[in-house]
Amino acid sequence: MRDARHLRMTLAVAAVLVGSVPVLHGVGRIRAAANPAPSTSAADGRRIFRFATFGDESFWTDTLHMNEVVESAVDPTTALSVGLKVDAEALPPAVVQGIKSGSIDLKSPATTLALLQLNAVVGVRGTVVKVGGKDTLTRFGITCAFCHSTVDNSFAPGIGKRLDGYPNSDLQVGTIIALSPSVPAAAKAAYKSWSKGFYDPRFNIDGINGPQVIPPAYGLAGIHRITSTGDGSDVAYWNRYVGITQMHGHGSMVDKRIPVNVQNPPDSISADLPALQAYQLSIAAPAPPAGSFDVAAAQRGATVFNGAGKCATCHVAPLFTDANQRLHAPSEVVSEPEPNGAPSYASRTGTKMYRTAPLHGVWQHPPYFHNGVAPTLDSVVARYNTRKGLHLTQQQQADLVQYLKSL
């Protein structure tokens, strides 16, 4: 087996050969310098989505010291176990072969540093330099893809081709944050309570622990209210909110309804928002896999959806949502009360209401509702049937599930 020093040299050389670090480093700043006018290109947006940190290294490195945690204790096996993903297409052939043969040690933090040099860890950016002759992770940051991308597992579990816009339902965000030595004990307990695929985007604002399901970032074209409570009228609102208040990138975010007033200069996000939105709006919802639903039952289920199930009242075709026309009071939805006894999530938001979720690609992202109270589509239908007094038969419910799987 190769020693760690030889491994680091091999991967560093591979990084130079494929040119990944020089091309992608500081993508947002490089693009802005070349073209001061904000880009609306989806291609630019894809690079921003995958690789731009908006300067959040100042938080993840200088405040949380995650670079020290990763360098000392996070090997690839550990990273995969908490839901981080590896982009197989960023791996040079020699690295692919080394993983297959076992000559690359997946239980060494040095290997994680080498993968970061290749920009192969989805949603994570790291700067690795020699300090006293040793590879050292000096800067650590995250990107949009951290929560809103996964991989197809085509190489191995957690390693494969990127699937942008898919929620990372394996990601244990709270567990990762709790690794920081700078997080107070009380906050660590809250973070550790978050299940995989859950995150509370208000916890650091209001101190309430009510984690929400990480939502998909696909299938949003034509929908004006893109969050579960419809707080913003476009994707750029939520990108700004998350980029500044959650990722802790540099810029300003003001929303008196919440209230939020974060000023974190210099502005490293505004110029990237148009292109980032363009890319996200270009990501179509995934079609259901062949053979994943009963076609005849789905056809019957469509009749239930538009008739006895009353689903089409709010899930209006072709977007399968009425979010562009209205929002709904908490009393109208079937997802509350919150499962852990927290206050209504809507009460913690700008609108104090809920958006009807669009249904294209709904087969792909369980659990369901903003708080994940329904683990399957069967439980979604059963919950509606009971709470809304629909009196659907078991056959109607089963057919309706098949129709939802077909969307």
Image (cartoon, rainbow, N blue to C red):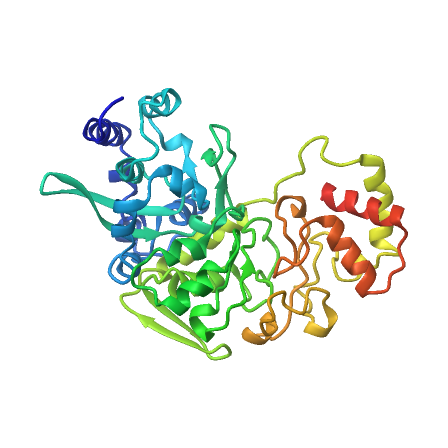
- Left or right: residue 37 versus residue 359 is left
Quadrant in the picture for residue 58:
bottom left
Picture quarter with the C terminus: top right
Query: Which residue is depicted at the point 61% across and 71% down?
Result: 341
- Decide which of 397, 30 is in the foreground and name it: 397
Quadrant of res 274: bottom left
**Taking the image as drawn, is residue 45 in sight?**
yes
Q: Residue furthest left?
A: 132
Residue displayed at 42% across by 69% down: 204
Q: Residue at x 64, y 72 (%)?
A: 353
Quick check: 333 above or below 196? below
In this rendering, is residue 348 above or below 82?
below
Task: Examine the rendered structure and indicate whether residue 388 appears above or below residue 97.
Answer: below
Rendered-image quadrant of the N terminus: top left
- Image coordinates of residue 161 in percent, x first then y, are 47, 33
Task: Provide residue 126's location: percent of width, then percent of height.
Answer: 28, 46
Left/right placement of residue 325 relative to residue 263 reads right
The front one of 270 and 295 is 295
Residue under the point 79% across and 55% down: 382
Q: Nearer the viewer, residue 153 or 219?
A: 153
The number of numbered discs placed on residues in the rendered structure image is 0
Q: Pick the residue in front: 156 or 350.
A: 156
Q: Name the side, left or right, on which 89 lies relative to 157.
A: left
From the top left corner, tell me how far across and down residue 203 is, in percent.
46, 69
Is residue 317 visible to the viewer in this orientation of the structure?
no
Image location (x, y in percent) of residue 4: 22, 30
